[in-house]
Image (cartoon, helix red, strand yellow):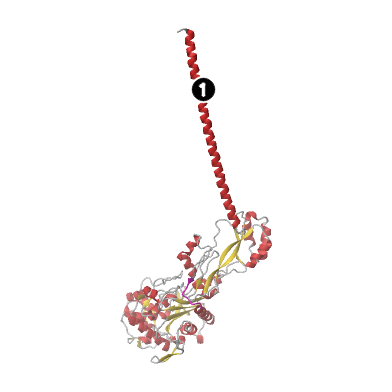
């Protein structure tokens, strides 16, 4: 092949290779352009979809804001929701507590132009306004500040008339108690956020209402009323008697409780001083809290323990009878004082002779009662009081129940003094519960502030003494009501029986000889007891005919209470002898 032919062949081959490369490059460029066009279309589609979603969300929120009251739109997160509470009613359906719709005043400090001007204007509506604190809130720079909770309609109208920008109103609930102080220690009260702080209000929160509120399930929804066991009519009368007694006897405090012996239902319970749950904390003119007023929060019937004095002789004699160490015909020697461990046990106005068991109860003999406890023994004594629930914390719905106190180690001297009510401190309510077991056939039934049927009561009851022991104790209560210290509590036609208790009050760990704690535990009608009533008077300075003992203070309270409430409780009066009784009214 010639040189020219070889060159021509190489050229033709090179042209073919170059042409192929050019064709491949063009195809590659076309593919890249197509892919880029497709990707651009995808990005545009995603952007269009994102914008559509964003505009949809914004549109929905705008609709929501348009449906909300503009007064509320200034509220910020972490502000409590409008929480409802159920109405509380008594056993007859009478209203004890309910919610009222209120408004509260708030501010958005970021929108406040002149804090000084706002404070001056608000002071026109709230004369006791804290200028310094309010000014601090308005200058905080935060998004939300409460200024005043739970306004009256007049206050709201006055603030609206001021036309202050940057403040608004938020709907809230305010708890209202129509009876004010009538049943304050039972019903309790709530705080400004409608959360239960005491009494049955706190119990409701403990039973799950607080959890529902936290989940937002109590806002704006109707809740079933909660019915209590108390009778508002009876409660009002009991409190009236107790309040008058505290004033008349110049006492530090007073109280009373009525208990159904068959069901354990608390029909009424009052402790004074008390308070108005509509204003649980009272503010003085200088802005401080009235500490004297807050003392009324203390419920002495279930939240405090006392040495109950000679009312404990009921349990000591019941113990001896139940253990069959004595009978009603037994006689014990009460002719001389007992000297033990450096102490002398003697009787108040003693008879200085042997006494029968009814006489021990009638004359309230410390010596005779100690002799009965000695027959049972220390271990038996402690076991019996434990069985009656007097040495352990009482089980009931009421929050804050006090725990009884007793000696760490029981010695003979402890058993002797406890036999007549010194050395063990219990709550007045659980003393009444234990007394009910002595009257109802021997069954201990824990107290309840909620309605309880007889069938439910039987299932909850626990036998603690024999039926015969209960019958003997009914005899002793009736005996003392007719012949002993219970005569001051007797109400004609209702056959009241019971036992007084006058104890030296413990002050700073020592017994004060001139300060008493008095109590009277009673049952009626004694032919078939239906109710136990217990009254207390703390540190009275005087009493009926000038006396300071339970017979002159606590017993007359029982008489006043039973005389007024027995007809309301449906107890028909009975007159005549035991053999031929007759009622005043036939039903």
Q: What is the span of residues highlighted in magenta in the rendered image?
A: 226-232
Q: Position of residue 6 (x, y in %)?
A: 47, 10
Q: How many marks?
A: 1
Q: Is residue 316 above or below residue 395?
A: below
Q: Nearer the viewer, residue 504 or 84?
A: 84
Q: In screen coordinates, is 287 left or right of 368? A: right
Q: Residue furthest top?
A: 2
Q: Is residue 332 visible?
A: no
* Residue 316 place in picture, x, y as percent: 36, 80
| Left or right side of 378 for 17 | right
Which quadrant: the N terminus? top left
Depth check: give the residue in front, 156 or 293.
Answer: 156
Tag 1's secondary structure?
helix
Q: Quadrant of residue 436?
A: bottom left
Spot occupied by residue 551 in the image (x, y as percentages of width and height): 46, 84
Does residue 201 lie above or below 331 as drawn?
A: above
Find disc 1 in the rendering and name its residue: 22
Seen at 46% across and 65% down, the residue is 206
Q: Is residue 2 visible?
A: yes
Does residue 513 lie above or below 286 as drawn?
below
Q: Is residue 489 left or right of residue 288?
A: left
| Residue toward you, 28 or 430 | 28
Residue 68: % across, % down: 59, 58
Q: Residues within 10 Å of mark 1 (few under 14, many from 20)?
A: few
Q: Please say whether residue 454 is one of the residues in the magenta stretch.
A: no
* Quadrant placement of the C terminus: bottom left
């Amino acid at each position: 092949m010639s040189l020219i032919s070889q060159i021509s062949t190489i050229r033709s081959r090179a042209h073919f290779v170059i042409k192929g490369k050019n064709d491949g490059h063009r195809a590659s460029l076309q593919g890249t352009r197509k892919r880029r066009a497709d990707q651009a279309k995808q990005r545009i589609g995603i952007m269009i979809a994102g914008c559509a979603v964003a505009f949809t969300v914004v549109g929905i929120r705008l609709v929501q804001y348009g449906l909300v009251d503009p007064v509320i739109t200034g509220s910020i997160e972490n502000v409590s929701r409008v929480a409802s509470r159920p109405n509380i009613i008594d056993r007859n359906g009478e209203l004890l507590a309910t919610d009222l719709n209120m408004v509260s005043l708030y501010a958005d400090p970021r929108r406040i132009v002149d804090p000084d001007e706002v404070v001056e204007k608000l002071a026109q509506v709230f004369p006791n306004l804290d200028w310094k604190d309010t000014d601090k809130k308005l200058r905080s720079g935060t998004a939300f500040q409460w200024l005043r909770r739970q306004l009256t309609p007049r206050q709201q109208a006055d603030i609206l008339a001021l036309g202050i920008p940057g403040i608004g109103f938020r709907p809230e609930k305010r708890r209202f108690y129509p009876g004010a102080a009538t049943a304050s220690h039972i019903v309790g009260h709530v705080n400004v956020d409608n959360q239960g702080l005491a009494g049955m209000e706190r119990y409701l929160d403990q039973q799950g209402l607080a959890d529902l509120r936290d989940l937002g399930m109590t806002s704006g929804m109707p809740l079933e009323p909660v019915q209590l066991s108390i009778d508002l009519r009876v409660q009002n009368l009991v409190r009236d008697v107790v309040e008058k007694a505290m004033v008349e006897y110049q006492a530090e405090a007073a109280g009373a409780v009525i208990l159904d012996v068959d069901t354990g239902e608390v029909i009424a319970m009052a402790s004074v001083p008390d308070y108005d749950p509509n204003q649980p904390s009272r503010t003085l003119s200088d802005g401080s809290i009235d500490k004297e007023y807050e003392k009324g929060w203390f419920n002495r019937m279930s939240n405090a323990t006392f040495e109950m004095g000679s009312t404990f002789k009921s349990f000591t004699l019941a113990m001896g009878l139940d253990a069959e160490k004595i009978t009603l015909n037994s006689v014990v020697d009460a002719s001389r004082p007992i000297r033990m461990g450096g102490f002398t046990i003697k009787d108040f106005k003693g008879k200085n002779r042997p006494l029968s068991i009814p006489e021990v109860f009638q004359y309230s003999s410390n010596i005779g009662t100690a002799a009965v406890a000695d027959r049972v023994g220390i271990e038996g004594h402690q076991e019996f009081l434990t069985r009656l629930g007097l040495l352990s914390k009482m089980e009931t719905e009421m929050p804050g129940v006090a725990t009884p106190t007793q000696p760490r180690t029981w010695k003979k001297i402890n058993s002797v003094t406890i036999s007549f009510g010194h050395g063990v401190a219990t709550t007045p309510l659980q003393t009444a519960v234990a007394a009910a077991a002595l009257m109802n056939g021997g069954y201990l039934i824990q107290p309840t502030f909620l309605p309880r049927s007889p069938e439910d009561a039987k299932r909850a009851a626990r036998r603690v003494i024999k039926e015969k022991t209960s019958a003997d104790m009914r005899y002793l209560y009736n005996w003392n009501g007719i012949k002993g210290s219970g005569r001051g509590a007797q109400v004609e036609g209702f056959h009241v029986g019971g036992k007084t208790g006058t104890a030296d009050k413990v002050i700073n760990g020592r017994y004060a000889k001139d300060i008493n704690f008095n109590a009277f535990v009673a049952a009626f009608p004694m032919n078939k007891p239906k109710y136990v009533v217990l009254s207390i008077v703390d540190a009275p300075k005087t009493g009926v005919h000038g006396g300071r003992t339970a017979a002159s203070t606590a017993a007359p309270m029982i008489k006043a209470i039973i005389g007024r409430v027995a007809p309301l409780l449906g107890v028909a009066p009975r007159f005549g002898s035991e053999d031929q009784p007759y009622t005043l009214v036939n039903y």
